[in-house]
Amino acid sequence: MQNAGIAELGLDWRYTAAEVRPEQLREAIAGAQAMHYIGINLTVPHKLLALDMVDVLDESASEWGAVNTILFEGQDDNGDWRALRDFETAPHQLRSHGFNTDADGITQSLREDLGMEVRGENVLLLGAGGAGRVAALKLAATGVRQLHIVNRTASKAEAIAHEIRTRFPAVEIAVGYPDGTDTEMDLVLNCTSLGLAAGDALPLDIGAFSLNKTRAVYDMIYQPAETPLLAAARAAGCQTANGLGMLLHQGAKSLEIWSGQTVPLDVMRAALKEAVHGR
Ligand SMILES: NC(=O)c1ccc[n+]([C@@H]2O[C@H](COP(=O)([O-])OP(=O)(O)OC[C@H]3O[C@@H](n4cnc5c(N)ncnc54)[C@H](OP(=O)(O)O)[C@@H]3O)[C@@H](O)[C@H]2O)c1
């Protein structure tokens, strides 16, 4: 996806993957900076650790409490910090600038794949790990009306609910399934990892909440393309979408930060589909 976008933009860059142990993350970031990398993406478990390791945090990273994108910058002769892509010779002073593009990826994909604006909607969110936390906060910031959070470890859902009550008091937030058999939700959003492995249980207790009572189901998992939850939702007549759109949009936003250009979304989408699903 990134290399297809980079090629389409005519940039002489390469996107590569590297495995880094958490205890060496600081050295890895410093090493990439010293080698004048344009930037890096970070994934689990580095997104939280990097908060304390970058020199400057963009509002997107401080707001959601995680860094998934770093832009390396240099200081020009006027003392201004600019992306390394703008320098012809390597600047002496360098710094790392941390961003988060995951949160916007979620709402953009909900809009594009399910036609859902989130504002004023009622959402049942499953999971309270890293992705669940960012999704819950982003939905709250976007003006969700009711948000129910269900998680195996209830204390993690409680901690997110507490943060939302403090930061977004207009949101009706609850931990657990909606009460009553007639409570309808606009969206069930799976942010657990249940569905990744064959034979996983459903992330939703259908005794506690029936899929007939929701309009749409979004699963952050994109491999398999149709998880058992999405298959059950389709059978129940719900609109469905998997997490490929979220992956696309967070990556596209990263490339936009690195390149400073509007990115070729269709080219990136096609490359991502080809890479993940072979079509
Ligand atoms: N589409 C995308 O771009 C994108 C981006 C990020 C993540 N994701 C996907 O989102 C999912 C969560 O990622 P994450 O980063 O939030 O992971 P994480 O921090 O490890 O959280 C995992 C979540 O799944 C729950 N869970 C795991 N095993 C379970 C089980 N056996 N029974 C019940 N609940 C279980 C955990 O519950 P406990 O808290 O009780 O452990 C927690 O809520 C993954 O599938 C990941 O691939 C997709």
Image (cartoon, helix red, strand yellow):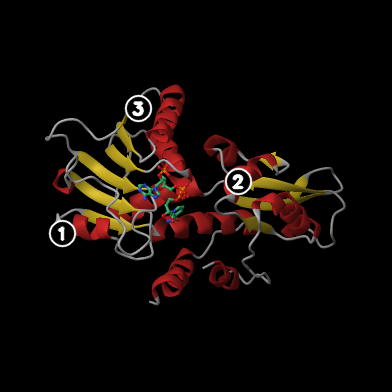
Mark 2, other Cα within 10 Å: few <14 / some 14–19 / many ≥20? many
Q: Position of residue 131 (x, y in %)?
A: 45, 46
Q: Is residue 91 visible?
A: yes
Please give the name of the residue rendered at 73% of the width and 49% of the height, measured from the top-left corner: 26
Q: Position of residue 73 (x, y in %)?
A: 75, 51
Amino acid type of the residue tagged 3 in the rendering: Val
Assess whether mark 3 and mark 2 are in contact (beta carbons under 8 angstroms). no
Q: CA distance from mark 3 to mark 1?
A: 31 Å
Q: Which residue is mark 3?
A: 171
Amino acid type of the residue tagged 2 in the rendering: Phe
Q: Which residue is mark 2?
A: 99
Identify the residue at the far left of this view: 182
Q: Quadrant of residue 170?
A: top left
Mark 1, other Cα within 10 Å: few <14 / some 14–19 / many ≥20? few
> What label sits on residue 121 in the rendered view?
none
Identify the residue at the far bottom of this view: 278
